[in-house]
Image (cartoon, rainbow, N blue to C red):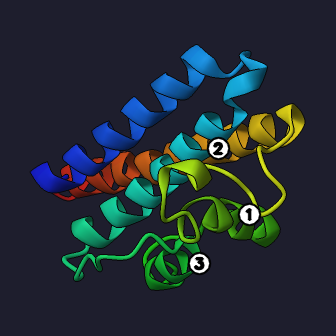
Amino acid sequence: MRRQTEAWLASARDDLRVVEEILVIEDLTHMVAFHCQQAVEKSFKAVLEEYDQIVPRTHDLITLRTLTEKHIRVTVEPDLLNQMNDLYVDSRDPSDFGLLPGGKPPQDMAQQMYVSACKIHESIGKSFDQQTGNQNKED
């Protein structure tokens, strides 16, 4: 695995670790959602990096997912990606940071975002591990 790929995945893992610390704090669901969005974004960018693709300066998860689909398939609810996009793409000032159009996400939605972000990060990491294992077998 490329060093930069590892850096993207490590940074995504750090976002997930932050979420683990604050997940149960109801007042911080917007921060949970924001860090989940960041973890997914960085995980998708790791795929692009690994396959020597241009890593665009975008935070749009739908765009990033589309760019990565030729290399890896990740199962996630499109609505959830859209909600995560709403949290980041539309937030331009601190008062909107990590908020959905209707305000802070409810606790159950924040939990769902966390579970999905973990699954995406894990499946991407495993695909690289399998790829590395297959390359070692060919050597």
Q: Which residue is mark 1?
A: 83
Closer-to-camera residue (56/124): 56
Gap in Å between the C-alphas at discs 2 and 3? 16 Å
The disc placed on residue 68 is none
Q: Which residue does the image show at 55% across and 61% down from the upper left?
A: 88
Q: Residues within 10 Å of mark 1 (few under 14, many from 20)?
A: some
Relative image position of residue 131 (x, y in whole percent)? 33, 57
Reading the chain from its start, which is encountered first: label 1 or label 2?
A: 2
Relative image position of residue 23 (x, y in whole percent)? 68, 22
Q: Quadrant of residue 28?
A: top right
103 vs 73, left or right, is: right
Q: Are marks 1 and 2 in contact (CB under 8 Å)?
A: yes
In the displayed structure, 83 sits above or below 98; it is below
Reading the chain from its start, which is encountered first: label 1 or label 3?
A: 3
Q: Are marks 2 and 3 in contact (CB under 8 Å)?
A: no
Which one is closest to the eye, mark 2 or mark 3?
A: 2
Task: Check disc 3 and report its element: helix, strand or loop.
Answer: helix
Gap in Å between the C-alphas at discs 1 and 3? 11 Å
The disc placed on residue 33 is 2
Q: Which residue does the image show at 53% across and 84% down from the upper left?
A: 66
29 vs 121, left or right, is: right
Q: Residues within 10 Å of mark 2 (few under 14, many from 20)?
A: many
- Three-letter amino acid code of the residue under disc 2: Ala
Q: Which residue does the image show at 30% across and 37% down from the upper left?
A: 10
Counting every numbered tag in the picture gives 3
In the displayed structure, 75 sits above or below 38; it is below
- Three-letter amino acid code of the residue under disc 3: Ile
